[in-house]
Amino acid sequence: MKSVCLLEQPVQAPFFPPKTFVLDTNVLLHSPQALFVFKNNQVVVPLVVIEEIDNQKRRQDEIGRNAREVSRILDELRSWGNLSEGALLPNGGMLRIEVNHGSFPDLPDSMHMLDHDKADNRILAVALNLKRDKKNSSVILVSKDLNLRIKADVLGIMSEDLNSDKVDFRQLYSGQIQKWISQEEMAAFFQEKRLESSAEPPMFPNQFGVLKCQSHPSRSGLGRQVGQCLVPLSAQANGECFGLRAGNKEQAFALELLLDENVKVVTLAGGAGTGKTLLALAAGLELVLEKNLYDKLLVTRPIIPLDGQDIGFLPGDKRDKIRPWMQPIFDNLDFLFKSSKGNQAGLGKEKPRLNGSQDRLIDAEDYLNFVGRIELEALSYIRGRSIAQQFIIVDEAQNCTAHAVKSLLTRVGAGSKIVFTGDIQQIDHPYLDASSNGLTILIERLKSETISGHMTLIKGERSQVAELGAKLL
């Protein structure tokens, strides 16, 4: 079988690891490559983890794919030596499957309340026994389960989350920067419609600059980094986009990116009510229906229930099943169609008022004469597709893993543009947080690319009530 991740078998030699990392099942189901991130250290996978991975391998989602990937990697490593004794890795470390130490040692009476048959507690027992074995080095339990890390701390075991795929969200790239310039530079910016960028502070491609005049602080300008110059915003950033206008400078920046054909990947982050999804939909409708720059508007979002409260199986065909998850999209489309007046789309008929009903929206496709030009799809069905000449919106992208975001990007075909929107502070995925979700990682890794742009929206524009709730609760 073709190697999945290894280059060549390392030379066997005596191995004395400085640390021993015990991996929880959720770490491998989140990222199979976690087996290789602990360089020059020992990686221990408890046997119960293999059993749990085996139980997940038949799933048809990302977790199932990762479970099968872990099994393939371990099977390849098996040819390098006995996994119970340890196999050397190309990164200088060693991987071992622990078949002993599955039972709890003598514990204080207060600890006997733990269920010894529970997989998490058996993993905890492995770490505890390894820690008590003097032959082992410093033992660290790696888990994405908060409660397991808490229990490890109670038992005196060092524990941590998987940090190799994390970004410091507090320092996350915002997409804009404030620059102080001289009065002469400000005049040149407005007269020549460009300003050579200074080295300090450095700017990323398509980053926006809020220019302030040093001698007259009240004078200001807004520009975008294009090549080596700051250029003023285009007229479309402050114009009407499918009946919608920007309510603040961040929204104007977002529209500048959304409506620019040369920016192929756009990320929009921000709190509830800041207009992320609404702006993306307005730009998509404008470019698909008004300007015919794309053949179709494709909207997708991960199907993850709020607070884990799943509503169970739903009746009907695929369209019926995804309707509850797509209701926020319908709400925004309803608002946009109401805001857009008369014959702006050149359809020959007045746009319907949909009153928030998804059934009315689906029926209205014939009325609007764009059957097939708007497609709503669950994220699960995107894999394997090649999506060309479409405006793609990935809503609630903060609930995507980094691998899911990679899969989406690799689906983008010729002539397509993709937009990711989300609030990194509102994550419903059980094993993601503000630092490890796919949207955060995408923002940070693409900030230096000339075909991508990002904007963090700050001010809520939905309503006073929504703004109050976002600030105070």
Image (spheres, rainbow, N blue to C red):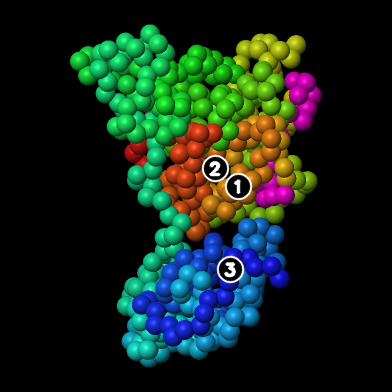
What residue span does the magenta drawing correspond to? 366-384
User: Camera-side residue: 43 or 300?
Assistant: 43
Q: Quick check: is 367 in the magenta stretch?
A: yes
- What residue did someone put label 2 on? 396
Q: Which residue is drawn at 38% across and 47% down?
A: 169
Q: Alpha carbon of mark 3 to alpha carbon of mark 1: how far?
A: 31 Å
Horizontal and vertical percent position of residue 399: 53, 49
- 216 vs 470, left or right, is left
Neighbor class of circle 3 (other Cα within 10 Å; few <14, some 14-19, many 20+) is some
Q: Give the structural element (helix, strand or loop) at label 1.
A: loop
Q: Earlier in the sequence, mark 2 or mark 1?
A: 1
Neighbor class of circle 1 (other Cα within 10 Å; few <14, some 14-19, many 20+) is many
- Quick check: can you spot residue 266? no
User: Camera-side residue: 463 or 397?
Assistant: 397
User: Camera-side residue: 445 or 195?
Assistant: 195
Q: Are marks 2 and 1 in contact (CB under 8 Å)?
A: yes
Horizontal and vertical percent position of residue 410: 64, 46
Q: Alpha carbon of mark 3 to alpha carbon of mark 2: how far?
A: 34 Å
Rendered position, 236 above or below 133: above
Q: Give the structural element (helix, strand or loop) at label 2.
A: loop
Q: Earlier in the sequence, mark 3 or mark 2?
A: 3
The C terminus lies in quadrant: top left
Indicate which label's residue lies in the foreground, 3 or 1. 3
Amino acid beneath label 2: Glu
Amino acid beneath label 1: Pro
User: Camera-side residue: 341 or 25?
Assistant: 25
Horizontal and vertical percent position of residue 14: 44, 85
> Residue at the left extreme?
215
Q: Alpha carbon of mark 2 to alpha carbon of mark 1: how far?
A: 7 Å
Q: In which quarter of the image is residue 124?
A: bottom left
- What residue did someone put label 1 on? 302
- What residue did someone put label 3 on? 6
